[in-house]
Image: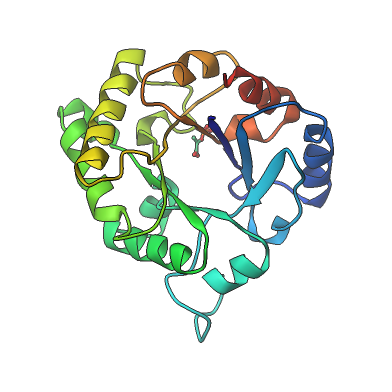
Amino acid sequence: MKFIIGNWKSNGDIDKKDSMIKSLKSVKTNNKVILCMPFHLLGGGNSVVEIGAQDISLYPNGAYTGDISGQMLKESNVKYVIVGHSERRKYHNETNEIVRKKSENAIANGIIPIICIGESETDKKAGRTMSVVKKMLLDSIPKQGDFIVAYEPCWAIGTGVIPTTNEISAVHETLFKALSKIGRDTTPILYGGSVNPTNASEIMSINNVHGVLVGGASLKYDTFLPIINAAK
Ligand code: PEP
């Protein structure tokens, strides 16, 4: 089973969500399809697609204006939440430590964190990809509980540029080995960054790629459906 996870970011409205959920209802798939929505669109879903969240507060309920707590997500029937997306790391200064705490907070509320890691273009050019992603992984994951990892090179997000098959394979192998070493070898490792209907099948056939995290192409049924169908 592969994971096909969409990330709508700060996009979408009630009509777009309803139309997507309705269209996906009749899709036949054995894979896990999740759409991570902005907070006002949480809840709902159907037998084909689950609705996940894009962030979780670092804190429990209390005086944290604007934060959406783990308990609130749980009450909205959220089972999966993205944490540490590169946009949150970049625009909200989220560190590995914050990402780890958010992951632990999700787990404490019965929610599976989808932990994003990935090197910058500067790291890649300097040949630091492996060391950077390994450190991000080990510093961002929770001490216990199940989680999903999404390898998303920052330079591939929303750019239309993706790593080569060999590059994706090498990073996923490094992540798999690092997870195996700490007894987490069953952790799903997804690839994210400019996945589209044309490249999805090849990406998902790479060893140790257990699915994809999709931004732009998850916004429209016409581009999301072929990605779901590309998962064998
Ligand atoms: C993302 O933001 O997680 C992402 C992978 O975006 P895109 O597919 O648009 O590159």
Residue 172 in view here: yes
Q: Is residue 94 visible?
A: no
- Taking 177 as reference, is 67 above or below it? below
Which residue sits furthest bottom?
63
Where does residue 71 sit, x and y in percent of width and height? 57, 73
Q: Please identify the quarter of the rendering in which residue 190 is found.
A: top left
Q: Residue at x 68, y 35 (%)?
A: 219
Relative to 34, does residue 108 appear above or below in the rendering?
Answer: below
The foreground one among 183 and 35 is: 183
Query: Which residue shows up at 20% across the image and 46% down it?
Result: 135
Q: Quadrant of residue 163?
A: top left
Which of the pair 179/118 is nearer the observer? 179
Residue 221, percent across and down?
A: 74, 29
Where residue 161 appears, as percent x and y from the top left, is 42, 21
Please tell me which residue is depicted at 39% across the width and 45% down the height of the picture: 116
Identify the image quadrant of the N terminus. Answer: top right
Q: Quadrant of the C terminus?
A: top right
Tell me where residue 157 sits by quadrant: top left
Q: Position of residue 212 (x, y in %)?
A: 50, 31
In this picture, is 150 found above or below 207? below
| 82, 146: nearer the viewer | 146
At x 62% / y 42%, what residue is drawn? 34
Q: Is residue 232 left or right of residue 84?
A: right
Determine whether, in the image, residue 122 is placed left or right of residue 84: left
